[in-house]
Amino acid sequence: MLLQFLKTAKHRAGTLVRQWQLRERQYQPILLDERALDAIRRHDYEALFANGWAEPGERKCTDRLELLVTELRAIAPEARTVLDLGCANGFIDHVLAAHGYSVSGVDNDAHNRVFDHAPRPALEIARDVARRFDLTCEFYDSDAQGFLESTDRTWDASLCLSLVHHFFVGYGFSGENRSGEEGVVRLLRLLAGRTRRVLFFESMPKVMAEHGWGDDVIRDKLASATDWNVREIGRSSERGFRERRLYALTPPA
């Protein structure tokens, strides 16, 4: 009982910090200038911020972008379509579209409604940026599982980045709408069924380990949920609570 109380208090404290951080900016960066697209195509992501071509977010996202683009081209060079679950304000989708992919982003802005902290709804920004720079992105206001259950479409690649820990702790660490391991497994099975070549999964080790999805077992759990091959491809430059690990899941030959 005491341990659970301490864990909850820790998450609440982290939530308050993140609320304060996001009062003035979004979770992900926002593209501001046409010149950003050329920098993206050169893989010069640092130029986006050094030149003011993108507004910084709570997370920079550029370290995992380099991994994603490199691995996607290596694993599925013929891939053209990407599904991004939990796309937030679409920065990763906009970058992938600049690289020539057609991207479908899904989010329901639940974190914004829970905390009322972001300057603008995330999907509103995602759509505005895509229109402004004529990027091949479409965005859906839906929860991840509901979206997958409502469509029979398939994509060459899919992204499930920093999403499933919310199934354990609730949207934005709020404790709301938790579905636990059962919800995570169902989501992964649905997503694998909608993905043709590669599924990229990002974990938040510090949180996932507290719910039985630590680094020592997560590959086995991902493989069991999808019946796909699992390989860790890298980790974010951040450490501690913000550390993320990235995995590539591919269907058996």
Image (tube, grey):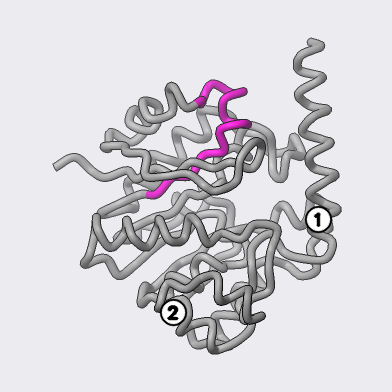
Q: Which of the two discs, 1 and 2, sits closer to the camera?
A: 1
Q: Nearer the viewer, residue 121 or 239?
A: 239
- Is residue 215 in view from this perspective? yes
47 or 84: nearer the viewer:
47
Q: Residue at x 33, y 36 (%)?
A: 226
Residue 9 falls in image quadrant: top right
Amino acid bearing label 1? Gln
Which of the numbered marks, if any, corresponds to residue 251? none
Q: Residue at x 51, y 39 (%)?
A: 203
Q: Secondary structure at mark 2?
A: loop
At which x and y percent is residue 229? 26, 37
State the residue position of label 2.
Answer: 136
Residue 213 in the image: state x and y as whole percent.
51, 26
- The residue nearer to you, when weighing 93 against 110, is 93
* Marks 1 & 2, CB-CB < 8 Å contact: no
Q: Is residue 154 visible?
A: no
Q: Is residue 146 above or below residue 94?
A: above
Q: Which residue in the protein does label 1 denote?
A: 21
Which quarter of the picture shows residue 47?
bottom right
**Around disc 2, counting alpha carbons within 10 Å, would you say few (fewer than 14), some (14 to 19), or many (20 or more)?**
some
Q: Residues within 10 Å of mark 1 (few under 14, many from 20)?
A: some
Residue 252 picture location, percent across and down: 19, 40
Decide which of tag 1 and tag 2 comes sooner along the chain.
Answer: 1
Q: Residue at x 79, y 26 (%)?
A: 8
Tell me the amino acid under the disc marked 2.
Answer: Thr
Figure quadrant of the N terminus:
top right
- Based on the picture, tell me whether residue 211 belongs to the magenta stretch: yes
* SS category of the residue bearing label 1: helix
Q: Which residues are magenta?
A: 200-214
- What's the distance in space between the residues labelled 1 and 2, CA to CA? 30 Å
